[in-house]
Structure formats: structure tokens, C-alpha cells
Amino acid sequence: MTEKCGVVGVSLDGRDAARPLYYALYALQHRGQESAGIVTHDGFQQHSHVDMGLVGDVFGEDDLDPLAGSAGIGHVRYPTAGSVDSSCAQPFSVSFKSGSLGLSHNGNLVNADEIRDELAALGHAFTSDGDTEVIAHDLARNLLEEDLVRAVKRTMGRIHGSYALTISHDDTVLGVRDPQGNRPLCIGELEDGYILASESAAIDTLDGDLVRDVRPGELVVLGEDGQGFDSYQLVEADNTAHCFFEHVYFARPDSVIDDTLVYEARRNLGRKLWAESGVETDVVMPVPDSGRAFASGYADAATETTADGEARDQDDDGVEFAEGLMKNRYVGRTFIMPTQDERERAVRLKLNPIKSTVEGKTVTLIDDSIVRGTTSTQLVQLLKDCGAEEVHMRIGAPEIVAPCYMGIDMATREELIASDKSVGEIRDAIDADSLAYLSTDAVADVLGKERIDLCLGCVTGEYPYDIEGEETDRDVHRPTLDGPTLSADD
């Protein structure tokens, strides 16, 4: 399982946008490492620099200086739709009769092929197989007939799926969130302007203040020269479909998403994990880094009650929290290793156990998820080889049983260990002494949402969008593309 993408857009008062965008992309680097790009506009023409690689590799002084203008957008990408090459790197830029467009997209459309075929039949030429170019072409076509707000509304009525967009139309910057609010997007105020970003951590990096989240179905247009913003609620949906995995894994712990600090959400998920399936062991330790907040909350709850839910005696400290696995941050991600043997070796290179913490002790190991089971198997074996008497696995999310179509590059059902195995079978497969996952109801409770307002497709197999061959968890249908156009009153 890998990250999604990160988007950002700024409008500033007389200051070039390129460097603030650059810093914001650094803050969002965890959301994508495949490519990075910035598009700016100086009031006369659009400037763009997009390339493959990390932010620090893509941009040098000579790349930032030509990006003139006080308005612009940026993007970091992990590929979820489209090829892994420069043709799908973003922001995607296009010039047409009504001006120039730049578009950054976090998410995934499920009807992109239908729209691409329709537009291709009308003469649109596509340079990539990604869904972002589909949105850009559709919006450009609508801008030939409508003003900016109506054009965005018409495009929103045609695309179906998950999207958080930052868009530049000449020197105007806008942000759009899909009607279910699946992908995060927020607004921040800077000393000399405003910013739109996937996560509030990017706003913090620029010494800004979080204003609020962009609402599901809302269009936000940043004012020229950073003078405020306008809001247009273009689409209303009965329920949201916030991605619960943003809080479990994807977002930075210091980000606030949908009014919830991610770090506190993870700690509270860890507390729920103790309440549901706590086990009395000598130590509890996280799989770094994403398991750390869960383990902290789990250990904190364990100081208050026993695994049976009884109040602890005053002289009983509960389960000790310990850092038992040290991470080598200079080892690449295991999923880029081409063979299974290399992926297993990479786990041994990346995580090294602290023998004094583990040897002769019973251990609870906490992670955010189990996908294929390969890493969990390796970690359990590492700890047992280091002398752990018992290794109990606890997972801060429900079992992942189905793929994600909404912008997460997740394994297929055939690769997901929980898709066809019970918890007991998974426990045996990874050679743990016990295994337990957090319940879906616990996740909803911690996030303060009804289950119907969360996207739970990867853990239920039922999705909030109309995806061919899959079940839905609500009454939802993809739009009919040959429907009527907007009237003047819309």
C-alpha cells in the first residue's frame, strides 16, 4: 500500500508563489515520491516546471527562478491512475482559446475512460492515460461556453469518483473537493495571502493559520493578490465518504483533517485497540513510524485498566511502552524491490530490533495495517530471533479485504491476505502468538462519524461510488454523460 498525492495552491500579494509552493510540496512529500511540479502565472503567461523524482531533486534555484507570478499550484504524485512516467506528472497544463489551465489532482475517477472516449470523439487529443488530463480537457471545453464557476459545476456533474483539485485558470487559483469529500483539502491564511493544501502541515510550514476544510462539493476561489477567497457550494450530497485511512496511515500526524488532529485520532484508535483486544505483555512496541501513535495510546490505556477492563491497582503500571525496532531511514521502500526475496531482505535492512528490549520478554507489536502479510511475518520472526518469548500483533485498523479505487495504490484481492483468510489463519501465517484488528465501529466512533459518512470500501468491499463489478454502500450512480447542459439559471 502506498501514498496518494498531494496538492497545493497559493495566491499572494506581490510575492512570487514558486518558493512557498516549493516549501509546501516538501511538507506534502510523504503523499507522493514519483514526481513533483509547480505551475505559476504572472498575469501574462503561464510558467511550468514538472519532472520525475522527489521535490529536492526536481527543483533547484535555476528551476524556481523562472516560475514568475504571485499565483500558482503544485503537486507531488504517487501514481494511482496512469503510467509511471513524465506524461502523467502534474500539475497538468493546457492552453486553449479562453486562457491557460493548470490542474493538480489527488484521487481517482472511476468514469475517466468514458469521458476520455467522448472527448476524443469530439477531437480532443490526449497525451497521457491519466484521469487528470481528462478533467483538464473537460473543464477547458466547458470554459469555452461558461464562466469559471458554471464551468466547474458542469465538469463536477460529469466526473465520478474521488478528487481534491487545485486549479489555476490564468492567475486565478481555485480548489474543488468532490461531493463526498473523500480526499482532504483545506484552506489556510498566510501573512500575505491564502493557500489551499491537501494537509494543514503544508500551511504550518509557511507559518500560516488553518482556516477550515474545503467542504465536500465546494468550490473555493482565491482572491487576486491574496485578497481573501470566495466560496460556492456547487453540489450537495446526503452523506460524505471521508477516507478513514487518512487518519490511520496516510496523513502526517501533525495535520488536522476534517477537524481532527491525526496524531490524537491515532492515539485514540490505540486506546480503543486496548479496550477491544488488549493483551497483558511485558512491553508494547510500535512498527515505526506509523504504529507509534497507536502504541502510545494503547500503552496509555493499559495503565488505567487491565486487559479484562478492570481498574488497575495503584502499584500496577500496566504494559510498558518501548521502542524495540529502530528504523534505517536511508533504505528505500520495500514495494520497489522487484522480487519477494529482495522485499524480505529490505525489511531486515530497514528495521533492526533492540535486543535488550525484546530478549526474554513477551511483546505486543502494533502496526497500522496488514496488507500482504509479508512484512508482518518478517517482523514477528525478527523479534523471535532476537529472543522474544511471545509476539502478539495488534492492528490499528480493520482487516483490508478489498482494493481501493479512490486514489490509493493498494494490492488486488488476490494479494490481500485478509481477503480469503480468517484472523486465525492470518495469525498462523505470520507466526504470531495472537492477532487482533480494530473494529470498524471503533474507527467510526473515534472519528466522530457515522459509518455511512466514511469510505470503508477496502475493509467492507462496499464502496461509496458506482464502480463496475463492485457493491455500493449507498444509493449512488455514475452520471449520464449525454445529459442536458446547464441552463442560465443553474
Image (tube, rainbow, N blue to C red):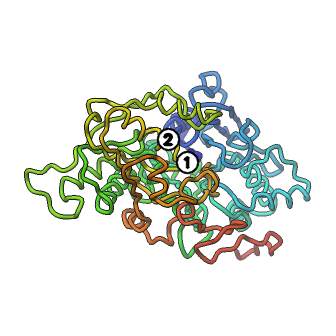
Q: Evaluate if marks 2 and 1 touch, with contact meaning CB atoms under 8 Å apart.
A: yes
Q: Quadrant of residue 309?
A: bottom left
Q: Badge 2: few (under 14), some or many (20 or more) residues near its Cα, within 10 Å? A: some
Looking at the picture, how far across and down is residue 14, in whole percent?
A: 55, 38
Indicate left or right for 392 with 136 as reference: left
Tag 2's secondary structure?
helix
Q: Which mark is residue 372?
A: 1
Residue occupied by mark 2: 375
Q: Badge 1: few (under 14), some or many (20 or more) residues near its Cα, within 10 Å? A: many
Q: Which mark is residue 460?
A: none
In the image, what residue type sits under mark 2? Thr
Looking at the picture, how far across and down is residue 461, in whole percent?
A: 59, 65
Indicate left or right for 470 with 269 as reference: right
Q: For the image shown, how many numbered marks are present on the structure?
A: 2
State whether residue 207 appears in this view: no
Q: Residue at x 54, y 66 (%)?
A: 460
442 vs 434, nearest the viewer = 434
238 vs 395, nearest the viewer = 395
Find the distance from the CA under tag 2 to the CA under tag 1. Answer: 8 Å
Looking at the picture, how far across and down is residue 196, in whole percent?
A: 53, 49
Q: Quadrant of residue 58?
A: top right
117 vs 43, nearest the viewer = 117
